[in-house]
Image: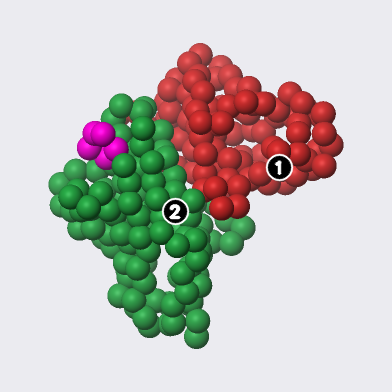
Chain colours: A red, B green
Amino acid sequence: NAGVTQTPKFQVLKTGQSMTLQCAQDMNHEYMSWYRQDPGMGLRLIHYSVGAGITDQGEVPNGYNVSRSTTEDFPLRLLSAAPSQTSVYFCASRQLGDRSYEQYFGPGTRLTVT
Amino acid sequence: AQSVTQLGSHVSVSEGALVLLRCNYSSSVPPYLFWYVQYPNQGLQLLLKYTTGATLVKGINGFEAEFKKSETSFHLTKPSAHMSDAAEYFCAVSDEGSQGNLIFGKGTKLSVKP
């Protein structure tokens, strides 16, 4: 199993540009989520999904869109990038029936918006 | 609402000394508690977790943590620090009512002096 994979690893955008951060998992996990990590802030939840066609907002959803058309993929879209979205983005997944609630994290995407 | 407080954004210890990283949480329901480690420019790796049962939890790399409900704490310890323990450590909380979404503390950066 590859686990949770994220592409790209690094990305530089100009203000106003759009892009999609890709996340895929091969563990058949129903739950997937996106977090952003900023220095001194820990990780904060952006959006999450508990299955195909079902998404919900987390703590910091503004400026980000998500959709879940398959179990495997959970892309994060920035429609009009802003410097405040400069961050490291992590995708995570878990099995809904797993009572341990353990989430498996991808390697991250480092995004810089100039 | 859940929250996590990690006391000390930076902790420095000498090699061979005790490591103690503090984590306090707030939750109105029984919590699930996690410690994650992040090495420089890498993703998050689960160190250990508490869900139910034994309150002293052992993890990887010689770390352990004790869930103390009366103190709402889940401090991370290791008897003898190694240079390779230098990293950032994150405490996180979840519960059954939140779809397993994680609330992270702001992190503690551990330095180990030779």
- Kindly check if marks 2 and 1 are in contact, taking CB atoms under 8 A apart as contact: no
Question: For the image shown, how many numbered marks are present on the structure?
Answer: 2
Which residue lies at the image location 51% right of the left edge and 14% below the top edge?
A: A53
Measured as percent of width and height from the top left, residue A23 is found at: 59, 34
Name the side, left or right, on which B79 lies relative to B110. Answer: left
Q: Quadrant of residue A91?
A: top right
Using the image, determine if residue B81 lies above or below residue B57.
Answer: below
Assign a secondary structure to mark 1. Answer: loop
Q: Is residue B76 magenta?
A: no
According to the image, label 2 marks what residue?
Answer: B90
Which residue lies at the image location 67% right of the left edge and 26% below the top edge?
A: A63
Q: Residue furthest top?
A: A53
In front: A52, or A11? A11
Q: CA distance from mark 2 to mark 1?
A: 21 Å
- Find the magenta span and give its range: B27-31
Please name the amino acid that badge 1 sits on: Thr
Please name the amino acid that badge 2 sits on: Phe
According to the image, label 1 marks what residue?
Answer: A86
- Chain of the residue displaying label 1: A
